[in-house]
Amino acid sequence: MIDAIGALTAISDVITSFPAWRAAGLVLLGAVVAVDQVSVAQLQLAHPLVAGTLAGAVAGRPLEGALAGALLGLLLAGHRPVGGVIPPDAGPGAVVAGAALARAGAAAAGTGAPAELAGAPLALALLLGLVVADLGRWTDAWTRQRNRDLLVQAEAAATPAAVQAAVARAIGLAALRGALTVALLLPAIGATGRRLPAGGLHATVVVALVGGIGLAAGERLLGTRRGRGIVLAGAGALAALLLGARP
Amino acid sequence: MNHARLFFRGLLLQAGWNRERMQALGFTFALLPLVRGRERAIEADFVRRHLDYVNTNPALSGVLLGAVAAAETGLLAAGQGGEAAREPVAALKRRFEGPLAALGDRVFWGWLRPLLGVLGILLLFLLGPAGTGAGAAGRGIAALFQPGRGTPLADPGAGDLGWAWASVLAALAFYNGPYLVTRWRAVKRGLELRPDGDRGLAAAARGFGATRIASLCEYLGPVLLGALAARLALAVWQGAAATVAGGARGVALLVAGCLIGAGAARFKVAPERVAMIVLALLLLAGASR
């Protein structure tokens, strides 16, 4: 048993560069915010400000998480879950962004690094958050299609127990989606802390670029298939540039 | 049906949300106690009838849930379940879901949710006491706009973290207070409603204050955004040395921001649009320094 825990910890360290319990906490948080976002109660635990702060706390630096979440919240504020619209997956996106910036903050703390260093990791964290939020729409749409299948099954059985089981499965599916989303992004979260580009990039220009992408994403571009491709390609290129810029 | 039970089951309204029948699964789940333990045929008919399309705003869904629960209770007691209940219940859903969605989406998704974020940022990063509270976070934001100054990163103290958690909890309470109270009262109103058309709905909306919340937010939103813009501008111009209000000039800027926000409210400016424009302008201003 102890060997198994040791092995898991070692694997987690290799993949994420932070302890297994923090990784497990982030995955659990991903599940919680994905459920709160749509399925149960909508108490706004999935609001980027809240989810980002919680993710930052789990990753060890709540203030950095709050900063990433707050900015992501502003960038995604134009999207509303009204009618049949599936909005960006803001909750899991904020968990990833908040944890990424928190790990970057933890890596820089105590090194006497200049504060301008915060710009590039912030840009990278916001990019990660925006990409996760946008791609999350597809997985969200997939789970909602499964919800339709569950409804049809419950209708065929036509019993209260079948309805109850369908609701439980739908909530479980939402939780699994959020958990998997964050789990798949753990290496990227760890990388943000490991590879801080010191200088080289004018931090605020990068943040402004992200702001521009966010504006485009929020207003028009992400509404079309072609626009989404352009934004995601640009975001990917910028993320590669940031990750590739070694200290 | 018990008010509290319907309220708590109603929190799962969107659990099985899908594009074809929207909230049908959660809606049926909330109403299940009405038929549990009855004859198998009644149960089956009830489930099939309610797994039909339904979609409204979750915060105000209690009106619809309560009204349908009250109608179903009456029909079942009178032995008029089954096919006989299909049309009156469907008519009730059609009558209420659209107007409730329009009102609820405007108040909760259109105003309160974006304002949660704005209020959180104001409290967390911009209004904390300098040197304690949000001081470190405020300095961090200011440093973003002042590359090259080389201010060392500081670890936040216990005061910073306490302020951060208090700010996030206050922003959550700002949303969830009206949201949960409205949701609770909506169920109560729905259970008391008699299907007498739009007058009943209007009375319900007035009764739990949703329209008052909307009116208040139309002014509160732009005022908060004005304050946010002013405080961010102060962080850009005064940099890491910025105090909470930035002295007399800072107070004047804050008041001006609030007044401009109040003015914008007259022109019905969408809060998220203002927030994004403010953010983009300030980021560009910072980048050009």
Image (cartoon, coloured by chain):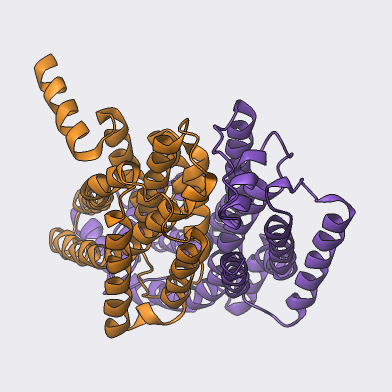
Chain colours: A orange, B purple
* Figure check: A3 above or below A25: above
* Figure check: A236 above or below B238: below
Q: In this rendered view, identify the residue nearer to me: B288 or B47.
A: B288
Left or right of residue B215: residue B155: left
Left or right of residue A41: residue B279: right
Left or right of residue A195: residue A121: right
Residue B185 at what x, y percent from top left?
Answer: 60, 54
Q: Give the image quarter of residue A148.
A: bottom left
Picture residue at 60% right of the left edge, 78% below the top: B198
Q: In this rendered view, identify the residue nearer to me: A198 or A180.
A: A198
Quadrant including the N terminus of chain A: top left
Residue A138 at what x, y percent from top left?
Answer: 24, 68
Residue B177 at what x, y percent from top left?
Answer: 62, 48
Residue B242 at what x, y percent from top left?
Answer: 74, 49
Left or right of residue B26: residue B269: right
* Figure check: A3 above or below A153: above
Picture residue at 53% right of the left edge, 45% below the top: A115
Instruction: Note whether residue B66 is visible.
Output: no
Picture residue at 58% right of the left edge, 54% below the top: B179
Residue at far top of view: A2
Residue at far right of view: B248
Q: In this rendered view, identify the residue nearer to me: A166 or B233.
A: B233
Instruction: Note whether residue A54 is visible.
Output: yes
